[in-house]
Image (cartoon, rainbow, N blue to C red):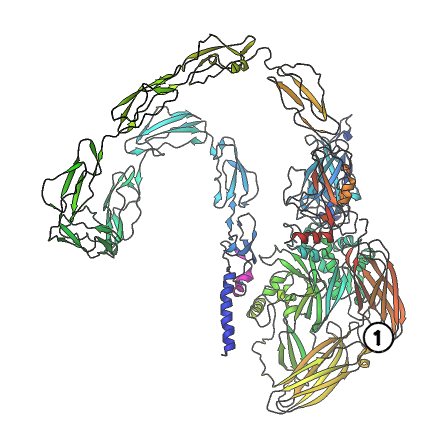
Amino acid sequence: MSETSEPAFGGRRALPRNASNAAEDDLPTMELQGLVPRGVNLQDYLQVTDIHLFKERWDTNKMDHHTDKYENNKLIVRRGQSFFIQINFNRPYDPRRDLFRVEYVIGRYPQENKGTYIPVPVVPELQRGKWGAKVVMRGDRSVRLSIQSSPECIVGKFRMYVAVWTPYGILRTSRNPETDTYILFNPWCEEDAVYLDDDKEREEYVLNDIGVIFYGDFNDIKSRSWSYGQFEDGILDACLYVMDKAQMDLSGRANPIKVSRVGSAMVNAKDDEGVLVGSWDNIYAYGVPPSAWTGSVDILLEYQSTKNPVQYGQCWVFAGVFNTFLRCLGIPARVVTNYFSAHDNNANLQMDIFLEEDGNVNSKLTKDSVWNYHCWNEAWMTRPDLPVGFGGWQVVDSTPQENSDGMYRCGPASVQAIKHGHICFQFDAPFVFAEVNSDLVYITAKKDGTHVVETVDTSHIGKLIVTKEVGGDGIKDITDTYKFQEGQEEERLALETALMYGAKKPLNTDGLLKTRSDVVMNFEVENAVLGRDFKLTITFQNNNPNRYTLSAYLSGNIVFYTGVSKTEFKKETFEVMLEPMSFKKEEVLIRAGEYMGQLLEQGYLHFFVTARVNETKDVLAKQKSTVLTIPQLIIKVRGTRMVGSDMVVTVEFTNPLKETLRNVWIRLDGPGVMKPRRKMFREIQPNSTVQWEEVCRPWVSGRRKLIASMTSDSLRHVYGELDLQIQKRPSE
Amino acid sequence: MRSKDLAFIIILIISGEVYAEEKPCGLPSVENGRIAQYYYSFKNYYFPMRINEKLLFSCLAGYTTETGKQEERITCTQEGWSPEPRCFKKCTKPELRNGYISDVTLMYKIQENMRYGCNSGYKTTGGKDEEVVQCLADGWSSQPTCKKEHETCLVPELYHGNYSTTQKTFKVKDKVQYECAAGYYTVGGKKTEEVECHTYGWSLTPKCTKLKCSLRLIENGYFHPIKQTYEEGDVVQFFCHTNYYLSGSDLIQCYNFGWYPESPVCEGRRNRCPPPPLPLNSKIQRYSTTYRDGETVHVECELNFQIQGSEEIRCKNGKWTEPPKCIEEKEKTACGDPPFIENGTANLDSTIYYNGDKVAYECKSGYHLHGSTEITCKRGKWTHPPECVENNENCKPPPDVINGAVVDGLLASYTTGSSVEYRCNEYYLLSGAKVSHCEQGRWSSPPICLEPCTINVDYMYRNNIEMKWKYEGKVLHGDLIDFVCKQGYDLSPSTSLSELSVQCNRGEVRYPLCIRKESKGMCVSPPLIKNGVIISPTSDIYENGSSVEYKCFDHHFLQGSRESYCLEGVWTTPPLCLEPCTLSFVEMENNNLLLKWDFDDRPHIFHGEYIEFLCKRNTYVAEFSITGSELRVQCDRGHLKYPRCIDRERMLSYQQSFRT
């Protein structure tokens, strides 16, 4: 089929690796065997004059295959399902005399046994699970075929040819980009590895191009919309480009396990010049602050056009872009958020927090961090590489945290395996298990070098795992898919199983039930609005008939959402006297001025309260974080909300701070309504309002969303969104 | 524990009970299969499962589910797991000598087929060159083997039997018979058998063997001698263990038809009773040698003895219930005089009659006895006596005979023994007895008068026949009538000559049919059709077998045969020309339809052709059919049934109105 003349592989291979979808070589239009006798006109044999693919978006092929939403002129079908094409010949087709085949080719070195060269035979009846073409109608000079692809076909963009047999050799149509066909994963097909049996779930996890990502704090869950935009113009090609950039072998692209694993490596830029560079430095030089992105569309388009990693992203951005990648190719996927996620854990089920002798946090020794929240993806597929029962949702995480066999990637790890502690099953299950199951151990580092374990908090990590609900913007708690309920016997059993399979737990904290102090300490943080003062209340309860004195420390930190502290903006110590069997309350006022100067983009404040009972030397410790409520962007719309008709969108923002905001970027996005746009404002004075107007013309009808974000030097993570209902064109 | 806790626990227990009914599925055990590992370690958490919960099980390597897959899903139902999870062994590719299997598969799933062929000179078990076998639950449907193809068969040495011929070698398809000696039988269990020579050997290898008997061990006992198989003539003796009793014969012999008598059984002591206690002076009965638990015996006392106690005794738990006694009747209760019957007398041979004595009755002359001739004296009472019924009964007047009459007229009544004579009307033949007798009030069967036949001129004209001879008057039953065909007519080819001579049968004549000679099979002008014309040249008259051809108008669909033939004077059915359909764009607009295929946009659509529509954007089909073919309609004689597509919102409300 192709020339194997290149000696560059040095005798090691017969052909180079077929790892690029975009690369092409042409199949010859004439493959003759021997000489053609004089006087024989090969054109007398059947000749193809035209090919119709019925690839309009309103035609049956795209409608039946649920690919009509793609902004793409070429034919897009899903594997394992039949579609129609029509071939026009120069004369009527006679099945007794004429022999022809439809051929699908992908990559530069197509080979039949690798699935990259597919000759489709004309068969009397289509057989489930196999390639075949059945003549469904014979017109005057045309033949309509129903072609069925194999549910194990490679996912990508195929070139199509029609080859006619003559006694002297093969005559083939020439390369025609109009007949290119994309073949995607098919969650509607029973034989496909990504088969999902629920129609509502398919609508959500494959066909929904807008989503909601949850963040914030366990006590104060926030949500924001994200534009996945998997159907937008150019995104499908960008996703195929991602796999090409990874140099992923074409024959592996039929396996969703391999595709999702490569995706988790490629969405982050580390090791492989992937899509997004991660940055948590709060400066984000020469790039876009992660909180400014409103969706995956401009990130993927920028990546494909510049061929360079895009700056910058943090966990939800990685998750959002990865979700687009998976849904675009047809793998059902969703973004999940885990509150209090244990990080850089090395599959170690213990997070050590070191305290000074006086109860303050020892920042030198404390290296483990608990992220307030972390986002990753779940992809739906069967796992034939694992024993029965581990198919279904698989964790895939593209945020670069740890090396998995040499590259920054994670997953697919079976959620069922994690829940039951079977972390022996590939890939990276021990890491994910530790992310949701670690214990927090508070250790006092004494001056003499010894370490004393003070308390163990087993329920803090992985407190809540959520995702967007199906068919709505609400929140769905999926913690019970990852873990058994705290305190249940099954939870212990799962942990035992995990330990059996190699999870590490250096300190045996079983039975370490420190004699409970008779003093109970707790504190609450008042709901804080950016730019205003707020209160912190600490309560002490003395259940002992003795009188106690306590030395208490309050440490207020401005932290990244990763829990890594930037600065301590408040430090207070106070003595508390507790009468026997009494209750005492201490209030601390936090002024806006104290934190505003240091505030990071997400407005996270983290408080640590420790108290030492002088009489018993007991140390009480508690930590809490709070997210400041940031004012929102207001989006308004004027004009008829109809496909093809102009609409005016206005974004409004009022500066709540007492200082001027500089270098303000406002981004506006709306899948199916407008392409992502942005605008810069030099400065916004305190208490003044800015307005930005844009005109757009929606092209998709139905329930849509407009998403806006604002970022500036000193204030970030400001969002706004608006739900819209776009009408269809009346003439349709 | 507080009462609140108690109540809570009670509720838990109760709800547990209720729930138990809704959770009928426990951990399924699958032989050679597995469910997910964690179900085993977390068994108590997951099981029992509720109805409609699903589970996935997979079979071990080398095994498949019933449908041939490696994994299968089972659902919990009221009756447990459905379908029942089972794993079947795959069939292995067999070693095939002298043959080849073209498939490379080593292991075959259930229902998979395998084709094997034999080398030249060898044939499959079915006698062919190639055969397909299927993998079933317990192995191959038929074990693949290649047997040597013979051209000839050699008769094997036959012991205890002889062949019907001295020929030793036979060709394929030849048959040979053999007979077995006395006491020996063929493979088929018969005395003689015929076997055929096939390419792979004899259909049945000739062999004479003695029939064998075999014995199974008996419970609670043993027998002697113990052999694997017994030959004809062998005798076996049975013994029972202590406290067990042999029921049946303790000696049995092997014959060519099996054992006789049947093997006995050893029964427990409790099951049997000793012989029943029949009291003195009770009637001797034939009783069997063994009585089993539950059997009863009926006791009857001798004459002049009265039963005291229960008439029945029963064998229960190895003993009999209390037997009765037969007490002599102190007072011989005598019956009174035997009853008097009218018109009859009793044969008294004694003055006094006691229990059991009998008396016979006789009737006067002219009377006969109704009932039993004897009566018995039973404890002072006589059994029911008979009746003497008058002999002579007079007859009513005799029945009428159709088309006949009684000679000399009728009387009001006739005495027994008298008779009457019948006579038939003119032209009617008397059949049966001329005279009828009166006997005990009933007449003997009267005769029948057979009807004559009248020649129907109309029928003759219709059938184109004439009478050969001239008849005077009517034709009597049984007479022959000769017909001839009219001038210019002949018998139809299917009628035989004998039909021209017809017998009169009780007024019925079967007129034969004669048809016109020249016009045999000719047809007149062919039928005209709507929307079509005849394209072959027309004439006034057509020969038998000729045809005409029809053509429909433009765009009309010809249904039926294009040609019509003249068959025996009748034209075969001409075709139908069916109107075409035209697309109505107005209709399409009204129903929100678009044409699916461009080329359907033509002015005329033939009857029978299909047109496919598409619903316009955001509209959906109003009515759903099971086949889903509502958008594909067929042109039916000019009519197209346009489907309807309606808007999504309207659709929902439309569907709502359908939901009850």
Image height check: is A44 above or below B326? above
Whether residue B264 is visible, yes or no, is yes
**Near-viewer residue (B170 or B182):** B182
What is the chain letter for disc 1? A
Image height of A689 relative to B273, above or below: below
x and y percent of residue A449 in the render? 65, 82
Residue A673 percent coordinates (x, y)? 81, 57
Q: In which image quadrant can residue B643 be found?
A: top right
Q: Where on the picture, by quarter, is residue A580?
A: bottom right
What's under tag 1, amino acid-wise?
A: Pro
Disc 1 is placed on an element classified as loop
Q: Is residue B400 left or right of residue A424?
A: left
Q: Which residue is mark 1?
A: A656
Q: Quadrant of the N terminus of chain A?
A: top right
Where is residue A187 shown, x and y percent of the image? 67, 53
Q: In front: B490, or B598?
A: B490
Main secondary structure of the magenta stretch: helix
Q: Which residues are magenta?
A: B34-45
Q: Is residue B41 magenta?
A: yes
Taking the magenta stretch, the answer to whether it contains residue A436 is no
Q: Residue at x 61, y 54 (%)?
A: A384
Q: Is residue B429 left or right of residue A29?
A: left
* Whether residue A398 is situated above or below residue B202 in the rendered picture: below
Tell which of A9 and A722 is nearer to you. Answer: A722
Q: Residue at x 31, y 26 (%)?
A: B397
Say which quarter of the image contains residue A543: bottom right
